[in-house]
Image (cartoon, rainbow, N blue to C red):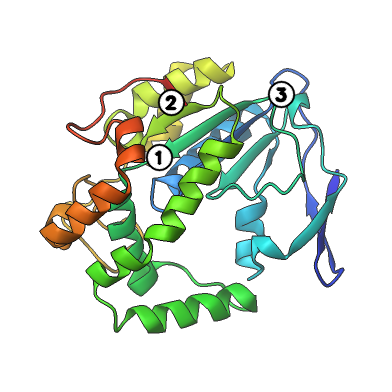
Amino acid sequence: MKINLILNDDTNIEYEVKEPNGKNKGFAIWGIHKSGSSLFTNIINKICDASHIPYINIPDFLFKRGIPLGDIKRIDNFPDLSKGYVLSGNRTYWNNSFFDISNIKNILLIRDIKDVITSHYYSLKISHTIPKGGKVRESMLKTREKIQSSNIDEYALNTIKHRKAILNNYLDKLPCSTIIYRYEDIIFYKREWIKSLCKYLEIDLSTNEIYKIVDKFDIVPEQEDQSKHVRKVIPGDYKTKLKPETIKILNTEFEHFLTKFNYINNLPKYSLDKI
């Protein structure tokens, strides 16, 4: 089937999606930039392919074409997700009454906001892929140029309002039944995490099939490489990159979120939590 993405200038872009397999239920995955969202999306997409579950990844589809999500005016022919479709690639809550997620399972991936900001700084400055054309390319080139003259502490403080808006939007808009995973879960406990997730989503893959998919993405660099999208991986990098006074401000500004997601005293243990 074809989904029609109608942009603000009335351009119609077709997005093709396969038919559901008739067995699996639909679900949606959400994250924030630099929370392991690309890894999460890639693994889920491979799991879906292996299980013949159709997934809809509009954010990445539009990004490659240089089109901002905000340019979508409406979406026609969007399927009922509960019939067995997966909504993936989401790094913000961009649903503007385009689809219904109230009757499906939702999974949110989060990370210590201090590590998110640190990782995003180097990504925007050096390593993040930029589309070949479009508004997104223009915007990212301007951001990259601007950030060259900005140090990481300035960037961290200037992005507080934006980060709070993303997190608050998730807490306000996602169903209360949403399952939360943390960055550390998918970095340190990949196999346990994905087995638990497949069980929760009722995806019938053997342990060997799951491990074959997950192990392809089990990449931890031996040392930091700022030119790579997978730069360092190990949590707590902010401690060597941000000034103590910047860390203190971020801890204060994001105390509510750090407490809710168990990032105040210790790294979280592997578990499933609900919002």
Label 1 is placed on what type of residue?
Answer: Ile
* Residue 239 vertical position relative to residue 243 in the rendered view, above or below: above
Say which residue label 3 marks.
Answer: 103
Q: Residue 232: x percent and y percent? A: 23, 54
Which numbered disc, 2 or 1, marks the residue closer to the eye?
1
Which numbered disc, 2 or 3, marks the residue closer to the eye?
3
Residue at x-position 67% and y-position 68%: 67
**Residue 127 vs residue 206, the one in the foreground:** 127
**Residue 44 vs residue 208, the one in the foreground:** 44
* Quadrant for the N terminus in the image: top right
Say which residue label 1 marks.
Answer: 110
Q: CA distance from mark 1 to mark 3?
A: 22 Å
Q: Is residue 4 shown to the viewer in this render? A: no
Q: Earlier in the sequence, mark 1 or mark 3?
A: 3
Q: Is residue 75 shown to the viewer in this render? A: yes
Q: Residue 111: x percent and y percent? A: 34, 42
Task: Count up the numbered dots.
Answer: 3
Q: CA distance from mark 2 to mark 3?
A: 22 Å
Q: Callout 2: helix, strand or loop? A: helix
Labels 2 & 1 near each other (Cβ < 8 A) = no
Q: Callout 1: helix, strand or loop? A: strand
Residue at x-position 36% and y-position 39%: 257
Left or right, residue 259 beside residue 57: left
**Residue 184 vs residue 48, the one in the foreground:** 184
Q: Earlier in the sequence, mark 2 or mark 3?
A: 3
Say which residue label 2 marks.
Answer: 194
Label 3 is placed on what type of residue?
Answer: Asn
**Residue 128 vs residue 42, the one in the foreground:** 128
